[in-house]
Image: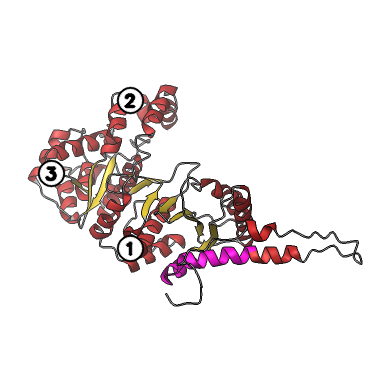
Amino acid sequence: MRFWRKSPYRRVLNDFNFFEFIIDAMIELKKKGHRLSYNQLMVGLFSDDGNVEEFLSLLENNKVGDDADKAYALVKRKYSQVDVEHAKAAKQESAFRDYGNTVFRVLQLTGFVTVEYTGVLMLTPNENRMPLYKALKARKFFVSESAKEDEDEYFEQLGAFDDSLESLILSHREKVDHSTAEYNKKIPNIISSYGLTPDSIEQALIKVSNGDKKGKDTFWFIQDPVKFEFLLTLFVYTYYGDTFEYKPNFICDEAGIPYSHAPGNVGDIEIFNKDRYWLIEATLIRSKNQQVNNETVNLFRHIDDTVNGQKYLTLVAPYIHEDTKLIFNVASIITIIKSKMLSLSSDAQTTDEFIGDMKNNSYFEAITYRSQDFIQNIRQQLNKGHFDETKKDKVSIHYESFIDEDLAFPMAAEDFPMNEEK
């Protein structure tokens, strides 16, 4: 853990490995068919010595449920000296919301817990990550007493672990990369348990896209970049349901709640059936240079060209710069020609544009139309370039009719014409 000892939210003597203590408590609860509630986690923050058995006994004899006030009253009653030694922690808002939320976020980021919702957040061990947890626990990490009092020495010791620790972590990484397998089964449970509706998902998507931190946020504990990918997946599901398979490439717990973004060299969200393959790339990047460098040409390499059917690629961002749009469209043409991916349609869209096309119930038609329209415009501009003897100062080229053939878009019956009612 980080340098906690002098934190105003921790009692001086409880500098044991808190995460090991609380995860072991969850493991014991699961053996009995129980989970740890968010409020019980808050009580655990004030444990004296990390004794799992005593902590579970305390919870058994003092029911707190979803009542934060009751949980805080237990803390005040059980740990009365908190008031004297750490007055700041005596405030419920500080202890449970500020400090407590921070610890919860970090714990969720480890991937060692599965987060579920039953009117209150519930925690249980994420079995996908338990082999790594047990391997790390067996390493018996140790921080000297002097390092606990000196921040520089503390971080120096943390940085002194040998390369075998990295090897251990990497050896377990493959075991969690497939955490979104059969994600179609997880999405309905997430929507149902959190009481989500198409409108609430849309509003949450807009909120994270706009960077709006005000008001209620159901998934406050998920980092914004991966939350954006997650909400896009849920949003698309509300329109197409199980007519597609959904394979977001973020890493999630057993309930489908993500804790880490997609690894490198793969697309963000793959959606497919026997007729269509749709790759959605999601980013909160607004900078023009970063968009151009990171969210254009390279995205086309993420398309799975082994899958049959019409192919679609969508870049979704809060704002799309004109240069981003242009380079994205040109990269699409190059991909079509070089990879002979003649069925590819693509578009770079703002979040609002994406939502608008989805709500019109003609998403694939719209993206195909815009892709074809861009190619037609390029063709027309190029074919105006006949060499003119009277204007020898201009370089003019006539592109042969191969463009008409090589850039032809095979049309699915449901894609055209655009002006017909669906």
Q: Secondary structure at mark 1?
A: loop
Residue highlighted by disc 2: 141
Q: Which residues are magenta?
A: 352-375
Horizontal relation, residue 91 to residue 335: left or right? left
Q: Are marks 1 and 2 in contact (CB under 8 Å)?
A: no
Q: Nearer the viewer, residue 382 or 218?
A: 382
* Residue located at (20% from left, 42% from top): 81
Residue 62, horizontal then vertical, whole percent: 10, 47
Residue 202: say if magenta.
Answer: no
* Residue located at (32% from left, 58% from top): 242
Tag 2: amino acid: Phe
Residue highlighted by disc 3: 59
Where, by quadrant of the figure, is residue 208 drawn?
bottom left
1 or 3: tag closer to the N-terminus = 3
Count how many numbered circles sit on residues in the image.
3
Tag 1: amino acid: Lys
Residue 42, horizontal then vertical, whole percent: 23, 47
- Between the C-alphas of marks 1 and 2, the distance is 39 Å
